[in-house]
């Protein structure tokens, strides 16, 4: 799966190492220019102005790169430019350094796989910023770790290099995690753990796993909604029923409690009224059977519930909660 960088455009304000393609921020300060022009002199024999230019260039690089978490590269660049001013050599040596591989781990992994969707370091930095924004907007910044920390950089590198999921896809998956963790009753979170053995602390990592497709994650999030909200209504659904009902009501979209609760209320009413006869007859009527019958998803379940409904009327008189009207009124939301 390719990674797209929203809004990424070729840099026009910064310099690039010619032919080497290493995109940098504007490094056109006098100290750096003078340093490159006088670099031929060794430190021992260099004129004072060259030493001063080198010191100015080193200080400038450190100050410029630190806000971007690139301080390690400033040290590498400072070391390299003591030995050469060839821009291609500088770019090549910098990319082979441990500091570069650590800072741009995700980009390095993509290149090793032959993936060139992220053209340069500047685009990678923009991609990092976009990922941070997704988690910040979702109120889940803690998943990545402290801003600028090694933990955060490693987490982002996994999104890029290991998972290869785009910013838009990460946003969709994080939204599914947020639906379960932040926007739902405890029963929904419990259902996700009960169905898929995933607790809230590992949920975000679970939904970001590239082995699982976005549609599959959405299907499971919807199933957890059905399982949890059903539990609040006294309905004990298994995972298979929850997935069928969640898919029926939500499709490929995010199922909300506002959509699901009216349907579950009706199913609960049917289960309570019809289930009492099943108990008297010493038979069983599961919540899943009632749900599938009510939503026209299982012919055998419908036949069973209708039979109980008919015998209920004959035995107790009056009408049952399960009528032909209730069957017809249930439709996909």
Image (cartoon, grey):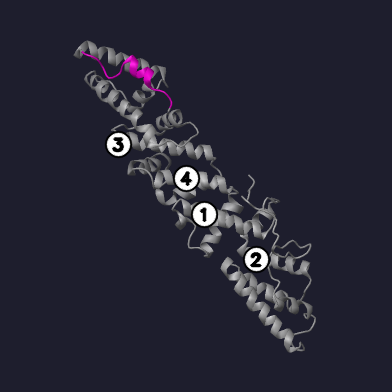
Which span is picked out in magenta?
318-332
| Residue count near mark 4 (Cα–Cα under 10 Å), binned few <14, some 14–19, many ≥20 | many
Determine whether, in the image, residue 101 is placed left or right of residue 324: right
Q: Quadrant of residue 27?
A: bottom right
Q: Closer to the N terminus: mark 1 or mark 4?
A: 1
Q: CA distance from mark 1 to mark 2?
A: 24 Å
Instruction: Please state which of the two labelled residues, at mark 1 or mark 4, is closer to the viewer.
Output: 1
Percent across and percent down for residue 289 are 36, 24
**In the displayed structure, would residue 217 be above or below residue 263?**
below
153 in the magenta segment: no
Mark pair 3, 4: CA separation: 23 Å
Helix, strand or loop at mark 4: helix
Quote the CA–CA distance across marks 2 and 4.
32 Å
Work out whether 92 lies above or below 246.
below
Q: Which residue is mark 1?
A: 133
- Quadrant that contains the C terminus: top left
Question: Label 4 belongs to which residue?
Answer: 175
- Residue at (40%, 37%) from the top-left corner? 256
């Amino acid at each position: 799966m390719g990674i797209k960088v929203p809004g990424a455009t070729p840099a026009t304000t910064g310099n690039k190492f010619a032919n080497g393609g290493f995109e940098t921020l504007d490094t056109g300060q006098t100290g750096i220019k003078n340093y490159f022009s006088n670099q031929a002199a060794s430190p021992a024999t260099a004129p004072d102005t060259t030493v001063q230019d080198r010191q100015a260039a080193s200080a400038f690089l450190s100050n410029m790169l630190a806000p971007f978490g690139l301080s390690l590269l400033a040290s590498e660049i400072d070391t390299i430019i003591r030995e050469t001013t060839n821009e291609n050599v500088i770019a090549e040596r910098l990319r082979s350094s441990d500091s570069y591989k650590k800072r741009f781990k995700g980009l390095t992994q993509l290149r090793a796989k032959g993936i060139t969707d992220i053209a340069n370091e500047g685009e990678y930095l923009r991609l990092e910023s976009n990922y941070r924004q997704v988690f910040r907007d979702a109120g889940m910044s803690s998943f990545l770790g402290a801003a600028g920390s090694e933990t955060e950089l490693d987490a982002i590198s996994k999104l890029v290099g290991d998972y290869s999921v785009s910013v838009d896809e990460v946003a969709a998956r994080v939204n599914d995690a947020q639906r379960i963790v932040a926007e739902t009753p405890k029963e929904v979170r419990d259902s996700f753990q009960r169905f898929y053995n995933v607790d809230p602390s590992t949920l975000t990592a679970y939904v970001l796993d590239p082995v699982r497709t976005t549609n599959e994650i959405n299907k499971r999030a919807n199933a957890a909604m059905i399982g949890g909200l059903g539990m609040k209504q006294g309905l004990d659904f298994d995972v298979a029923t929850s997935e069928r009902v969640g898919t029926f009501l939500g499709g490929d979209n995010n199922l909300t409690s506002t959509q699901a609760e009216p349907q579950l209320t009706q199913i609960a009413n049917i289960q309570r009224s019809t289930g009492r006869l099943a108990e008297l007859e010493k038979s069983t009527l599961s919540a899943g059977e009632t749900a599938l019958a009510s939503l026209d998803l299982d012919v055998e379940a419908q036949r069973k519930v209708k039979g109980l409904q008919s015998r209920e009327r004959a035995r107790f008189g009056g009408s049952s909660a399960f009528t032909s009207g209730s069957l017809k009124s249930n439709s996909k939301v």
